[in-house]
Structure formats: C-alpha cells, structure tokens
Image (cartoon, rainbow, N blue to C red):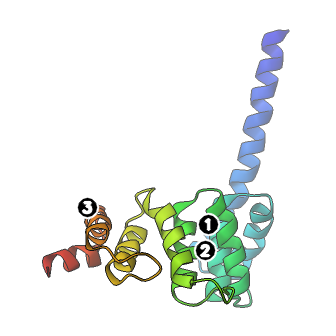
Amino acid sequence: MKYLRTIVALALSTALLSAQAEPMQDALDALKRQDYAAAAQLLEPLARAGQAQAQLRLGSLYYHGHGVRESNELALQWYERAARQGLAEAQFHVGNMYAYGHAPVAPDQDPNRLAAQWYFEAASQNHPEAQYSLGILFLTGSGVLQSDAEARKWIDRAAAGGHADAKRFLQGR
C-alpha cells in the first residue's frame, strides 16, 4: 500500500509539472512566432503564479511594448520579481533599467549604485553582460568607487565568458 501511495504521489507531481510546462512552452512558441499578444496572455498567469522565466519574459514584453502597452513601470515590476528569485538575466535587466534611467529612483538614491547592485548579483552568477556592465561602472566610478583593478577583474570575466565588447576592450588596452 505504501508503494501505491508513492506511485500515485509521483504521478500527480509529474502531472502538475507538465501542466505548468505546457503553457510555458506554448508561450515560448508564441514568442517565436512573434505572436506577442498570445504570449502575454499565456505568460501572465504563470508570472502571477511566481514562475521566474515567465516573469522575465513578461517584463520584456512590457519593456518593448510587444503585445501589451509599453510600460517601464510594469517591466520593472516583472523583472524585479524574477530577479528576487535569483534569475541572473532578470537581475541584469533591472540593472539596465536603473543604469539607463528607465526606473524611478528616490531623490536621495543613485541610480548607478542601484544598477551596480543588480549587476553584481547577475555578474556573480557568471552573466557576461552584467560582468562587463559592472566593470564599466568600476572603470568610470559610476555608482561605485572607481577601481581599475575591479574594472579589469569584471571585464576579464566577461571576456572569458565570450562577451565581444569586453574582448575588444581588452585588446585596445
């Protein structure tokens, strides 16, 4: 009887996982077809349920205005939800939103400091674009204390990860 319960529990778990996987795959298929409105409809319930990949992709739809009304506010909300779950790509996008002035900041906050914090989170997970962006912030002293050594460390890591601009930067030095 104990084995039967285990088998039933495994079957139910598998069914629940595949039930979530199907809508996500459908959303990814819609994105590939550039049917952004359908993708947004499929992603929203998954994002609201806490699925980080769905939150990231929904944030991108809002950021670019694909299939939904363009909204930096909603893009940031979805990116941040995914970023707080540790998704490096989302952390990088949150950093970009602060670095490029697409996210609101309080008068006493430095948007470059916020960008650096998010870039650091993503860079620590070996995200080459975040590593390069963080390196540039260290190089220029934007939001962080200027440090050629820290800049070189992060840009070297980005180049090792295949980041083309980081490789060009290192060749030019």
**From what the image shows, is residue 10 above or below residue 152?**
above
Question: Marks 1 and 2, Cα distance to the nearest angstrom?
Answer: 5 Å
Residue beneath disc 3: 160
Q: Nearer the viewer, residue 44 or 120?
A: 120
* Residue located 56% across and 76% down the image: 114
The crowding category of the residue bearing disc 1, from other C-alpha atoms within 10 Å (few below 14, some 14 to 19, many at least 20), is some
Quarter of the image with the N terminus is: top right
Comparing marks 1 and 3, which lies closer to the viewer?
A: 3
Q: Secondary structure at mark 1?
A: helix
- Confirm whether residue 35 shows in the render: no
Query: Tag 2: residue type?
Result: Leu
Query: Tag 3: residue type?
Result: Ala
Q: Secondary structure at mark 2?
A: helix
Residue beneath disc 1: 28
Asked if labels 2 and 3 touch by Cβ distance under 8 angstroms, the answer is no
Q: Residue 126, how many percent across, how many down?
A: 40, 58
* Residue located 28% across and 79% down the image: 165
The crowding category of the residue bearing disc 2, from other C-alpha atoms within 10 Å (few below 14, some 14 to 19, many at least 20), is some
Asked if labels 2 and 1 touch by Cβ distance under 8 angstroms, the answer is yes
Mark 3 or mark 2, which has the lower sequence index?
2
Query: Tag 1: residue type?
Result: Leu
* Residue located 75% across and 58% down the image: 50
Q: Nearer the viewer, residue 22 or 70?
A: 70
Q: Is residue 44 left or right of residue 171?
A: right
Question: Marks 3 and 2, Cα distance to the nearest angstrom?
Answer: 30 Å
Asked if labels 3 and 1 touch by Cβ distance under 8 angstroms, the answer is no
Mark 1 or mark 3, which has the lower sequence index?
1
Residue beneath disc 2: 31
- Confirm whether residue 42 shows in the render: yes
Q: Is residue 112 left or right of residue 59?
A: left
Q: Residue furthest toward the top?
A: 1
